[in-house]
Amino acid sequence: MKHKLLFLILVFLILYVEADDDGFVKTRGVQLMVNETPYYANGFNAYWLMYIASDPSQRNKVSSTFQEAANHGLNIARTWAFSDGGYKPLQCSPGSYNEEMFQGLDFVMGEARKYGVKVILSLVNNYESFGGKKQYVEWAKSEGQSLDSEDDFFTNAVVKGYYKNHIKTVLTRHNNFSGVAYKDDPTIMAWELMNEIICSSDHSGNSVQVWITEMASYLKSIDGNHLLEAGLEGFYGLSKTESNPNFQVGTDFIANNQISNIDFATLHSYPDQWLSSSGYEDQLSFLSDWLNEHIQDAQNILHKPLLFAEFGISTKNLGNDSSTLRDKFFNTVYSAVYSSASGGGTAVGGLFWQLLAQGMDSFRDDYEVILAESPSTSTLISQESRKLKRIRKMYARLHKH
């Protein structure tokens, strides 16, 4: 009887954990939590979701991606909530929005919820693709502002006004399918201020520090439900340049993430791009050191969760061993996450770049993972999902007892 009772309790806890992801993700110390249960994120990047979903005839690609992701235990997706000017924009001009694109994002949110996947929505790009900070500066120049650098994005009052308006528009948007405002939708795990913030004109880091502080405060004044992260790659400031891969981008992993309205830290890693003249083993060694150093700093200095929001390696130059070498790369990240998470540490998950559905050849960038085409990588991804789920169940049992 006693064993049967214990078994029933265990079954209840497992069901409780798996059915308990409907709430908002919060932080407690260095952990993410959903409804008092630790939350670990094994996920993927798919920047293209809104773009594809804006065409109803293509929405099956979005649905199949979420379904396949869920089948592999992936529970978080990171994607763009921006497309500024240019081709198929979300924001055609400051304050003017394309309803077709917005309905594409609405559809993405509905499918994510349907398949139990949380979403991180990024609000602007650092780069020119999909408009980015350069488009905002161009808009301001066309209104008579005297600007000479795209880095004026961070300091010019008119540009900052445009960006704040975009924050407000997205956060207060009511989903066309569910009727729920984005700021009230627990499907969203977090907002991201900018994809890979870079301000090369100010290596002191002051411009970015002031901008993050201002924008984080503004966003939180509208939405108190969701977590917020800055969108950093993890580069250190002037006090710790020796840890950077040979360049300065005007951000500071420590100072930027110490801002009170930033809820968790993020890290990206592309050693094949950053250390392009180095060999594979040296890049892998850098990756391992990069991960471990940031885990230690998030744990001991920031006291905040750390999410590996982007990692990937191009298969273009890996030769016949591309699958094996990519798996070794992924496993380096997954092992670091698991090692930290299993001890209650600061690493809460990783999101690889990028997941594609079949039939999306024009979106291939040599970093893509198509689960049906990549059996060994798919197995590795599923294993990480199961391992993180086991940690979660263990913590849930301890918490309940």
Image (cartoon, grey):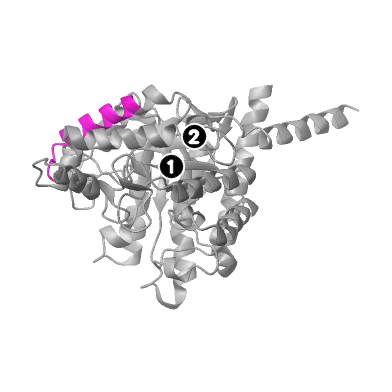
The structure residue drawn at horizontal position 45% and vertical position 58%, both measured from the top left corner, is: 354
Query: Which quadrant would the C terminus be assigned to in this image?
Result: top right
- Element type at mark 1: strand
x%, y% of residue 111? 59, 47
- The residue labelled by disc 1 is 121
Give the vertical position of 377 relative to 156 (above or below). below
- The reply to whether the C-beta atoms of the residues labelled 1 and 2 are less than 8 Å apart is yes
Give the vertical position of 253 relative to 378 (above or below). above
Residue 229 visible (yes or no): no
Residue 87 image-quadrant placement: bottom left
Q: Which contiguous range is marked in magenta?
A: 201-218
View extreme (right): residue: 1
x%, y% of residue 121? 43, 42
- Main SS type for the magenta part? helix
- The residue labelled by disc 2 is 182
Give the vertical position of 302 relative to 73 (above or below). above
- Element type at mark 2: helix
Task: Tell me the number on the disc at residue 31.
Answer: none
Instruction: In this rendered view, identify the residue nearer to me: 100 or 356.
Output: 100
Residue 371 visible (yes or no): yes
* Residue type indicated by callout 1: Leu
Q: Is residue 191 left or right of residue 249?
A: right
